[in-house]
Image (cartoon, grey):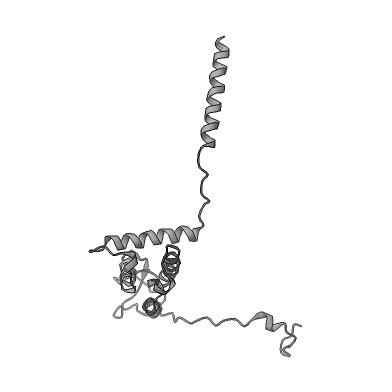
Amino acid sequence: MSIDKGKDIQEGSSSRSATSVSNQPPQPPQLSRYESQKRRDWNTFCQYLRNQRPPGALSQCNSNQVLDFLRYLDQFGKTKVHMQGCPFFGQPEPPSSCNCPLKQAWGSLDALIGRLRAAYEENGGLPETNPFASGAIRVYLREVRESQAKARGVPYKKKKKRKNLARAGDGSSNSSNPIQ
């Protein structure tokens, strides 16, 4: 009889565990790397606004607050940006270290603004009032790109758009092209 009791206890516990597993809500799908970064960046920006004195409201956010946020992020940067008076200014690979500041790289800021621009609209902001899409932000990013390129001695060249490949196959042949 004790064997049957144990069997009953085991059956009872297994039926309870099966029931408790089926009552759990389904797990949300795993976010992509981009979506995770976008959510993290959005939360960071919102936290930055809340920490301002007085706290900033997202509905009142403007490009000046976004610019302040980008400048604030420079303190966490990892890119050495040589100052005008530095002996290594304009050298792509300086021979030794210097005391020039570390800043956020232009590419990182550009990607960040793209994610925040998308997140703003996903969180109910109107495209017409998106502070991340303002001209002041574009000007700031262009200035950062140019100053960092100059400080490293690497000129930034805008990539030319590739011609439509469909045009190449429209029947017009190039006589200088040996492969036909």
Q: Residue at x 37, y 69 (%)?
A: 104
Outermost residue on the top side: it is 1
**Residue 149 % position (x, y):** 41, 78
**Residue 18 % position (x, y):** 55, 31
Q: Residue at x 28, y 65 (%)?
A: 56
- Residue 68, by quadrant, is bottom left
**Residue 156 % position (x, y):** 45, 80
Outermost residue on the right side: it is 180
Q: Is residue 23 or residue 140 the one in the foreground?
A: 23
Q: Is residue 43 or residue 127 the one in the foreground?
A: 127
- Residue 129, by quadrant, is bottom left
In the rendered image, the vertical position of residue 144 relative to residue 125, given as above or below: below
Quadrant where the N terminus sits is top right
How many numbered dots are placed on residues in this image? 0
In the rendered image, the vertical position of residue 22 relative to residue 143, given as above or below: above
**Residue 79 % position (x, y):** 38, 69
Quadrant where the C terminus sits is bottom right
Outermost residue on the left side: it is 53
Q: Is residue 15 or residue 92 the one in the foreground?
A: 15
In the rendered image, the vertical position of residue 94 relative to residue 160, given as above or below: above
Q: Residue at x 72, y 86 (%)?
A: 177
